[in-house]
Image (tube, rainbow, N blue to C red):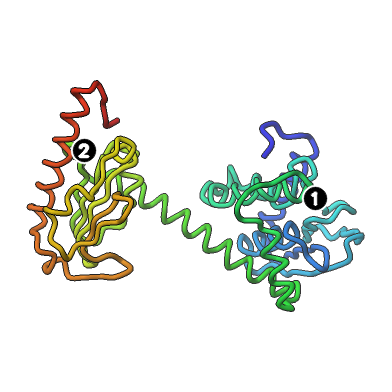
Amino acid sequence: MSKKLSAASFGEIEKVKNWLNLEDPITIATHQFVDADAAFSAALLRVLRPRAGLIFTRADSEITDERCLAVDLSEGPRAVKGLDEGSAFGLIVLAMKDIDSPVYSALRRWAFQLNKTDSGKMCNDSVILGELVNSWRCLKFDDGQIVAKIEELIKGKIKHEKRNLKQKEVAQSIGIEDGIAIISGDIRVKASHLFKMGALAVVRQSSCGQVVIISNKLQRQGISLSELKEILPSSWFIHPSGFMACFGSVKAPKNYQDSGLEFDDLTTIVKTWINSHIENLTKQGIKLGK
């Protein structure tokens, strides 16, 4: 997205914000035979204003109704094309930056992609949003059905972002001792958040079982949980890449009481193992942690 707004982009962003603040009834217009920009723009606006009407019209239509926002259309005073940003969707996402930060954060990568692909620039991203629209089109979905599908994607993406932010907050309450984050109970928190806080390993016990995950910092030093193969019970699974060892998981829950290890014993094993590696690395002049 642009670092400095052009006058045209600023004007269109204000148009989007003003429309979002209107009371019902309001309407969204976009061109028929939707492409990715039209479909994602209309879908995002429907997520933000669920009761808004949606109409599909000719691409050369000129919309003048002040209660209608014409996305990915070029003609008329209600048009929002996002030419300077690269896409109408990118401009709408940018408009959300100071209105609803989680929405902006959730969708900015999609917006960045559409800003490139819709403007004809090269894009090597692994997920091409336009291909989704083409796939649904090949399945004989009409414009309304395609937009409805994208609404589901956007709702899920925003929900995931808000859950991720909540888990970051929860991570702040987890203590890290000797580089080990210990989690007991069904606390939803990502290991990656704890690693960013300085943890070298996460030891967790929950209704799904017991698990140990080590950070990339340890893995880059050639440290692998496969080293604990002879110490952990044979019923434990150790990932071939060595970053995880577990007895049960969300994919295959098990009773942690059957793991063969008390949680305190598991924690002690991991702490002792990691401390020995830290000592060896320190002797080599290599420091780990924050």
Q: Residue at position x 79%, y 51% from top?
A: 80
Q: Whole-percent x and y of residue 230?
A: 13, 54
Q: Whole-percent x and y of residue 35?
A: 77, 62
Is residue 49 toward the left or the right of residue 141 in the image? left
Per the image, label 1 sits on a secondary structure element best described as loop
Q: Residue at position x 31%, y 55% from top?
A: 240
Q: Residue at position x 65%, y 71% from top?
A: 148
CA gap, disc 1 and disc 2: 50 Å
As drawn, 101 above or below 211: above
Mark 1: few, some, or many residues within 10 Å (few <14, many ≥20)?
Answer: many
Q: Quadrant of residue 222?
A: top left
In the picture, the quarter occupied by the N terminus is top right
Q: Whole-percent x and y of residue 96?
A: 61, 48
Mark 2: few, some, or many residues within 10 Å (few <14, many ≥20)?
Answer: many
As drawn, 47 above or below 230: below
Q: Residue furthest bottom?
A: 140
The residue identified by callout 2 is 179
Per the image, label 2 sits on a secondary structure element best described as loop
> Residue flagged by tag 2: what amino acid is it?
Gly
The residue identified by callout 1 is 81
In the picture, the quarter occupied by the C terminus is top left
